[in-house]
């Protein structure tokens, strides 16, 4: 998948492309990132990309011409193809996991990074295919937002994550996730973490996925740290018990922290009973 970044700070991306998931995706060829300096699409000697807002007010606004030229040059490279041209903006559609999944199905995505007071409205209306926000707050530029989008999308591409299955179980994981079901799956390739000494068939993974809930709490060694103990069940090696505990923990965490998510998750009868128990025990007076 190709990300075309349009920015006035091309060097901004250097460090994030040199480590972690984006580095891996670049090295593996799943992702190609092309950085386009918006100033290369100006036509004056000062390479001007901004101007004062009509109607007055503070700050500067990106002029439409360089942004249009930049995107049109990209479109001209593959005139038959249609691909999303995204203007990063706090006014856009909120980036959530399903949006990342939608973008992961594209072969090319253009990300326009604004700065200053933003970008001339004609870019949003007549050039971009959509505006995308990474959250309800205002950043000083679209570069960090573009990096967030790339990271969220790149890790969904087949072959980018080391353990495909880790996606199945994490927060917001959808019901249908493409994953690799190696029969000898073990979270860490090591024993003793209750993950699987025995073979874990694909159906197990699907059932243990948290589908739209927050992830269950994760622990690693040591089993006791400064008196804080890892829940006993996780050390038990009893996979059915572990799965039940994790599901319950994911339900409880989501109910406490993000009840809005619960409304959208398909819950089984057992889930509903568990949730009732959680609610009842939450309102139980604490025994003295
Ligand atoms: N005046 C604008 C904010 C401009 S911030 C407004 O109030 O809506 C400058 C640039 O930072 C924007 O053009 C956009 O590209 C980027 N940006 C800021 N906050 C963002 C967010 N939450 N999500 C995505 N991009 C953001």
Image (cartoon, rainbow, N blue to C red):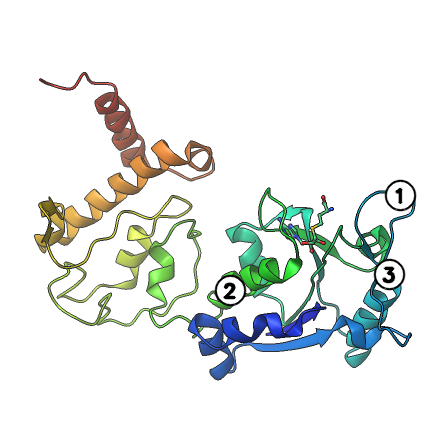
Query: Where does residue 80 sit, x and y in percent of width and height?
Result: 79, 75
Q: Nearer the viewer, residue 192 or 137?
A: 137
Residue 19 appears in the figure: yes
Query: Where does residue 35 sit, x and y in percent of width and height?
Result: 67, 76
Task: Check disc 1: other Cα within 10 Å, few if <14, some if 14-19, many if 20+.
Answer: few
- The label nearer to you, 1 versus 3, is 1
What residue lies at 62% left-to-right and 67% top-to-bottom? 106
Number of the label disc, if any, that sits on residue 142: none
Number of the label disc, if any, that sits on residue 151: 2
What residue lies at 79% left-to-right and 53% top-to-bottom? 124
Residue 81 falls in which quadrant of the image? bottom right
N-term-proximal mark, 1 vs 3: 1
Query: Where does residue 288 sit, x and y in percent of width and height?
Result: 9, 17
N-term-proximal mark, 2 vs 3: 3
Regarding mark 2 in the picture, which secondary structure is present there?
A: helix
Residue hosting label 1: 56
- The label nearer to you, 2 versus 1, is 1
Residue 213 lies, with reference to residue 30, above or below; the image says above
> Is 5 on the left or on the right of 192, as rendered?
right
């Amino acid at each position: 998948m190709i990300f075309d970044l349009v920015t006035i700070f091309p060097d901004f991306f250097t460090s994030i492309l040199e480590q972690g998931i984006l580095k891996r995706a670049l090295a593996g060829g799943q992702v190609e990132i092309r950085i386009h300096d918006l100033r290369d699409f100006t036509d004056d000697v000062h390479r001007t990309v901004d101007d004062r807002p009509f109607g007055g007010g503070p700050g500067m606004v990106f002029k439409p011409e360089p942004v249009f030229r930049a995107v049109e040059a990209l479109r001209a490279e593959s005139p038959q193809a249609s691909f999303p041209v995204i203007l990063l903006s706090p006014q856009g559609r909120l980036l959530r996991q399903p949006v990342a999944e939608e973008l992961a199905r594209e072969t090319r995505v253009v990300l326009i990074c604004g700065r200053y007071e933003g970008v001339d409205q004609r870019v949003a209306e007549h050039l971009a295919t959509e505006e995308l926000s990474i959250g309800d707050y205002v950043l000083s530029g679209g570069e960090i937002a573009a990096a967030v989008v790339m990271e969220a999308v790149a890790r969904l591409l087949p072959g980018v994550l080391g353990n495909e299955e880790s996606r199945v179980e994490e927060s917001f994981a959808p019901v249908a996730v493409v994953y690799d079901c190696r029969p000898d799956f073990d979270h860490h390739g090591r024993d003793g973490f209750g993950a699987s000494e025995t073979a874990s068939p694909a159906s197990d993974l699907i059932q243990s996925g948290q589908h739209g809930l927050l992830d269950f709490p994760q622990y690693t060694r040591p089993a006791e740290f400064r008196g804080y103990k890892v829940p006993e069940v996780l050390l038990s090696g009893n996979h059915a018990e572990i799965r039940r505990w994790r599901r319950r923990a994911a339900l409880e965490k989501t109910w406490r922290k993000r009840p809005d998510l619960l409304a959208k998750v398909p819950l089984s009868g057992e889930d509903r009973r568990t949730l009732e128990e959680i609610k009842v025990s939450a309102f139980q007076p604490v025994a003295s």
